[in-house]
Image (cartoon, helix red, strand yellow):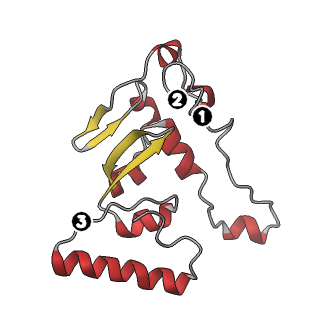
């Protein structure tokens, strides 16, 4: 399902997601769910694969990935989620969303090495030399980053 809940009212979105979960339970159906909505991912998925530049950069069980992102892009996505801070709001403090710096990779002209290296805070020369393999982080968790242990949350 490619973005099956995009532009839907929240109530209708919940109904569609519940229908999909019910079909999974009743007929043992698997679903490949493609979305940018991390809230929906957390709600529906058992496993997640994060893609950047058309390539899987991290894959893990959902809870593991949300608790311990190990690729800089995944960490950036999770860090950019809005956080409700009632104390800051009550004090009049301005709340700002975090953005991932830089521009999205141009698929016609990708950088040498890791596609994320121009935007990455952890970049080192090896990142520009070759595209890293999906490296094991813990069982069932892999990240396409040679510095995953430093990124790992």
Taking depth in this image into account, of 52 and 81 the one nearest to the observer is: 52
Taking depth in this image into account, of 150 and 35 the one nearest to the observer is: 35
Q: Are marks 2 and 1 in contact (CB under 8 Å)?
A: yes
Residue at figure coordinates x 56%, y 33% from the top left: 107
User: Looking at the picture, how far across and down is residue 7, in whole percent?
Assistant: 59, 74
**CA–CA distance between discs 2 and 3?**
30 Å
Counting residues from the start of the chain, the first of labels 2 and 1 encountered is: 1
Q: Residues within 10 Å of mark 3 (few under 14, many from 20)?
A: few
- The image quadrant that residue 143 belongs to is top left
| Location of the C terminus (image quadrant) | top left
| Location of the N terminus (image quadrant) | bottom left
Residue at figure coordinates x 43%, y 26% from the top left: 147
- Element on which disc 3 rests: loop
Q: Are marks 3 and 1 in contact (CB under 8 Å)?
A: no
User: Looking at the picture, how far across and down is residue 122, in whole percent?
Assistant: 54, 26
Q: Is residue 27 above or below residue 113?
A: below
**CA–CA distance between discs 3 and 1?**
31 Å
User: Looking at the picture, how far across and down is residue 40, in whole percent?
Assistant: 45, 68
**CA–CA distance between discs 2 and 1?**
7 Å
The residue tagged 3 is 30
Q: Are marks 2 and 3 in contact (CB under 8 Å)?
A: no
The residue tagged 1 is 105
- Element on which disc 2 rests: loop
Q: Residues within 10 Å of mark 2 (few under 14, many from 20)?
A: many
- Element on which disc 1 rests: loop
- Asked whether, in this view, residue 79 is left or right of residue 150, the answer is right
- Asked whether, in this view, residue 52 is left or right of residue 29, the answer is right
User: Looking at the picture, how far across and down is residue 79, in whole percent?
Assistant: 57, 50
The numbered disc on residue 56 is: none
The residue tagged 2 is 115
């Amino acid at each position: 399902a490619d973005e099956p809940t995009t532009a839907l009212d929240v109530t209708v979105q919940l109904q569609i997601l519940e229908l999909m979960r019910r079909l999974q339970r009743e007929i043992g159906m698997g679903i490949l769910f493609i979305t940018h909505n991390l809230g929906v991912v957390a709600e529906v998925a058992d496993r997640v694969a994060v893609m950047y530049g058309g390539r899987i950069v991290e894959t893990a069980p959902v809870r593991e990935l949300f608790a311990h992102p190990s690729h800089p892009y995944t960490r950036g996505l999770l860090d950019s989620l809005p956080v409700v801070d009632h104390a800051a709001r009550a004090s009049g403090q301005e709340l700002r969303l975090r953005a991932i710096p830089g521009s999205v990779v141009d698929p016609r002209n990708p950088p040498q090495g890791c596609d994320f290296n121009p935007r990455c805070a952890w970049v080192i020369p090896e990142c520009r030399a070759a595209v890293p393999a999906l490296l094991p982080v813990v069982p069932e968790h892999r990240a396409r980053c040679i510095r995953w242990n430093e990124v790992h949350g």
